[in-house]
Structures are given as C-alpha cells and as structure tokens.
Image (spheres, rainbow, N blue to C red):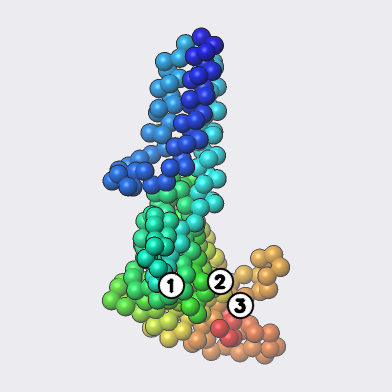
Amino acid sequence: MNRKIVFGSLLAVFLMLMMPVIPAVGYNMGNNKLQKKEHLNSVFTILDVLDIPPWLKSLLTFIFTLLFEWKMMELYFSRTIFVDDNAPEGWYDYMHVQTIQEGIDHARFAYANNIRVYDGTYEEQITMRSCIFSPGNMGFWLIGNGSNSTILNAEGQDYGINLKFTSGWSRVIGFTITNASKSGINIGDSQWNFISENTFINNQIGIKNDGGNYSPIWKNNFIDNYQQAFDTGENDWSFDWYGDIPIAGNYWDDYTGKDTDGNGIGDTPYLIPGGNSIDSYPLMQP
C-alpha cells in the first residue's frame, strides 16, 4: 500500500504541474470546452484506484486542487502574447501574432492575460472576452506602444474595441482608436475595466458605456468625435486619489470651461451624456 501511495502521489503531482504549462492544447485540437475539471479528472482517477484511507484521499485531492489553481494563476499573470503587423515571417508563432484579435483569441486558451501590441496601424475590430482559464473569469491587459504609434483603425467597423459582458477587469492602454461607425470602445455589461492613455479620434462616439460600472477612465484624449462619450453606468472619469499621481481627468476638445489658476485642469466639470457621469478634472491640453 505504501508503494501505491508514493507512486500515485508522485504521478498525480507530475500531472498537475505539467498540464497547465502546455499552452493551447484544447485550442489546437479544436476543443474549446476544455475546463479545469477535465485536467483534474486524471488525478482523481488515480486516487480512486489507490488503496488509501478516505481521509488521505481527501487531503491529496485538496492539495492537488490548490496546486492546480496556483499554477494557473502564476501562468495567467506572467505570460504575454506579442502582436506585430510587420514582423519578419519567422517571428510568428502561437505567442507572436500579426493581428490584435488573433492575440486575444490565442490568449484566451494559453493561460495569458497580457497582450502587448507593437507600433503599427491595425485595421480591425477587436472583441474582448475573458480568458477561458483565467482565475475569476478575468479579462486581458491590452497594452499598446503608445497612442502616437499604435493605431487601431476601425473604418468600416462598428467598434474599435468591443468589451463583452465576460470581459471585466480588462485594461486598454496606449492606443489611438479611430473611424468607428458606432464607438471607439463599446462597454456592455462589463465591470472594472481600466481605460487610460488612449486617443479617440473621428468616431461616432469615443467611448460608449451601456451597463458597465466601476471602470476608471482617465488620461485619455477625445478629439473630433461626433459625440465624445456616453455613459449610463457609474464609472470614474477622473481621479484625485491615485497614490502620488496628480489630479487628472481626460482631454475633451469641445470643453468650453476655463482654467483661471493655470494648473492645466478646467475649473468646471465636463458633463457626460447618458446618466450622471462627469469628468471632474478635465484636462486643458492633450
């Protein structure tokens, strides 16, 4: 019995540690329903056939489940998929892709939550959902190389970025989003998204939020949009409490207020249609 316990335990630990680090097994095989429970089943099957006391089986089951969850979280927060629309052909693989949407889709099945987008003009519409294997059904950190050099051109598309209801806790930082026929970023029933350091130009609506709440939306530029923003929820369009970062909101090119004390922040709030949202500290310059 002791040999069975030792052998089974070692084999189970090996399986638990190896399965999460094989990225995209389900995706590459066309099985998009691969879930955590299926990974654990092989370990539980081993425990079932071992001649061990029930209390030890329960303890091992608990330990293996914790190990699996820990390994998933470690991988999820440490792995990055890179996007470059103009890289040499040999650069591309599962973790190095050519379009932003491809990066999102691969990340959903690769235990990754970071998508880093290099300089370029990307002509596409992005749909963001949460990672299949993410802890807590979290979204992604979509990071551009800066709004001056990472352009998302949504001409002919409804949206630049469409945040679906499962994509909460996402970040969108460092893009110019332009030419969307409906909105540069569309937020549905999606909570706690962080949107900062982006520029919205020539969209029907810069950011439209219809149902999402608790999202910080700071230090963005809204320029030449038919309507700058629309928000029916409860979101933070400015901040005065973020550690050592100075008070700031967003830049709105149609803001008509004054800055009498010359501190770079408008003296009166910028009103955002749709509900009760305001930018309390509108920036005077982009």
The secondary element bearing badge 1 is classed as: strand
Is 69 on the left or on the right of 188, as rendered?
right
162 up-or-down from 137: above or below: below
Can you give x and y, in whole percent of width and height, for residue 55 in the image?
A: 54, 15
Q: How far apart are marks 3 and 1 (CA)?
A: 18 Å
User: What residue is shown with label 3?
Assistant: 281
Instruction: Assess whether mark 3 and mark 2 are in contact (beta carbons under 8 angstroms).
Output: no
Circle on res. 218: 2
Viewer can see residue 276: no
Q: Which amino acid does label 3 sit on?
A: Tyr
Q: Which amino acid does label 2 sit on?
A: Trp
Circle on res. 116: none
User: What residue is shown with label 1?
Assistant: 207
**Which residue: 48% across, 64% down?**
116
147 up-or-down from 69: above or below: below
The secondary element bearing badge 3 is classed as: loop
Of circles 3 and 1, the one toward us is 1
Viewer can see residue 200: yes
The earlier-in-sequence mark between 2 and 3 is 2
